[in-house]
Image (cartoon, grey):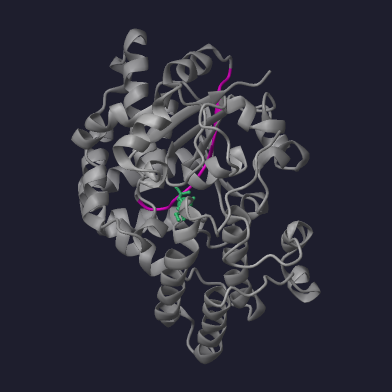
Amino acid sequence: MVPSPYMNDDVHSFAYDTARVRWPKILVQCIEDLSLLPPGSDVQWFTGKFKELLSAIDEDKEVQPFTDAEIKLNPSLKVYNEQLTSGMTWKTGPWLYLECYLYQYINNFFISKSIDIDIFQNLKQSTLISSKLGIIELCKKINEFDFCSVKDDDKLIFFKEFIDISLWGNSTDLSLLAGNVTLEDIKSIQGAETRKANEKNILVNGTTDIFTHLSQAKSPVVDIVLDNSGFEVFSDIVLAIYLIETKLAGKVTFHCKKIPWFVSDTLEKDFDELFKELIAFGDKDTAQFVDTVKSYISQKKFVVTSDDYWTLCSPYWTLPRDSIYEQLKDSTLVIFKGDLNYRKLTGDVQWDKTTPFETALQDLKGKINVVSLRTCKADVTVGLPEGVDERLKAEHGEFWSSSGKYAVISFCAKD
Ligand code: F6P
Ligand code: MG
């Protein structure tokens, strides 16, 4: 039986703090960033809308269905109405549903006025700039890397390193900045030394099985369901270059969000923003890196795409019934990046932490080749050996799984 979801009124869940502390901080920041609106926009109107939303959360109002007019402008919202239960309130309802609803609700402000902006752009850009040292370090490494000299026996060792780079790249999540994580913390997480030291914090590590699966495939293609822009998507591109250069993949498709999402998630335009910033660093290694990536895109070795499915509220158990499934079912590996993707893979429900990953995938189990590279920033974690949850609780308290210090690399192959 599927357990019940994490709820916003559960003091033992990270949801509790998120709804009361983090969401309001994010909304206040949005009001400050209304300066991004094009000239002539009705700033007052937008400020009013954000303030109304802040009060609705603060006063724990009942969450309202989206209107027909809103659904006409954004058909994804129909699914939200279907899953909205009567009497659901901001501070008591299910965390996953409400957090997705929140970002759709914000997006409605802008689409209702036909304004196409990313309200999180300033935050995204400043964090990207603060990642400069980590990015230059990695660009240099990639540019100097002699891929042809990688012997078959060494491919796994390097694969592990590049998987780790992409995994810990997920520590860079701007919505976490609304908590206690500083930019300094993020910077240090990006360094090679920190990655090594963090190896013991990978609680489930399916890297060797993933490598075996990939290296045995006939014409391997890889899909990456992206999470955050900036340093994280940069680290994903680094992994993808390794896959292409060592022929572990002939093509890598990057799946982006279509609307501004969970503050830092990658939109298609964030690839261009990344290229612009890397050039602006004025460093020869970052410029060369951009040339490499652009040439992969023009050769169709890299494909950048987006789909509304990624901004629904549904667990990925529904994926085999959605049209995007057609694009993913023949993929050699579908790598889901980050915490929110993991919450959606497992339904964000209160699984016992020793539940096998494939059980938590429900209807998705065996339908596609799933890999999750996730640093743990929420309560749900599965696939742990007996006793690990108890040990971590004793060492760090009940919120160890939301601290961003631990990670999982989980794999479930297609039947
Ligand atoms: O509140 C923290 C949080 O916003 C979680 O709700 C969410 O799962 C996570 O951060 C987003 O992390 P990521 O960018 O890794 O998906
Ligand atoms: Mg994210």
212 over 195 or under it: above or below = above
Q: Is residue 368 left or right of residue 33?
A: right
Q: Is residue 34 left or right of residue 116?
A: left
Check the picture and name the quadrant holding the C terminus: top right
Whether residue 244 is visible? yes
41 over 7 or under it: above or below = below
Q: Report the residue at 29% width, 36% height from top.
A: 395
Q: Report the residue at 29% width, 56% height from top.
A: 181
Point out residue 57 in the picture as x, y percentages from the top left corner. 55, 73
Residue 346 or 321: which is nearer the viewer? 346
Q: Is residue 355 left or right of residue 132?
A: right
Quadrant assignment, res 108: bottom right
Point out residue 96 in the picture as x, y percentages from the top left corner. 59, 53
Whether residue 266 is visible? no
Magenta-colored stretch includes residue 305: no
58 over 268 or under it: above or below = below
Check the picture and name the quadrant holding the N terminus: top right
Point out residue 28 in the picture as x, y percentages from the top left corner. 42, 76
Quadrant assignment, res 205: top left
Point out residue 163 in the picture as x, y percentages from the top left corner. 38, 29
Single out the residue that lies furthest toward the top: 153
Q: Is residue 67 left or right of residue 100?
A: right
Residue 12 or 263: which is nearer the viewer? 12
Q: Report the residue at 35% width, 34% height from top.
A: 392
Find the magenta span and give its range.
Answer: 219-230
Count of all numbered marks drawn on residues in the image: 0
Q: Report the residue at 34% width, 39% height from top.
A: 168
Residue 295 or 407: which is nearer the viewer? 407
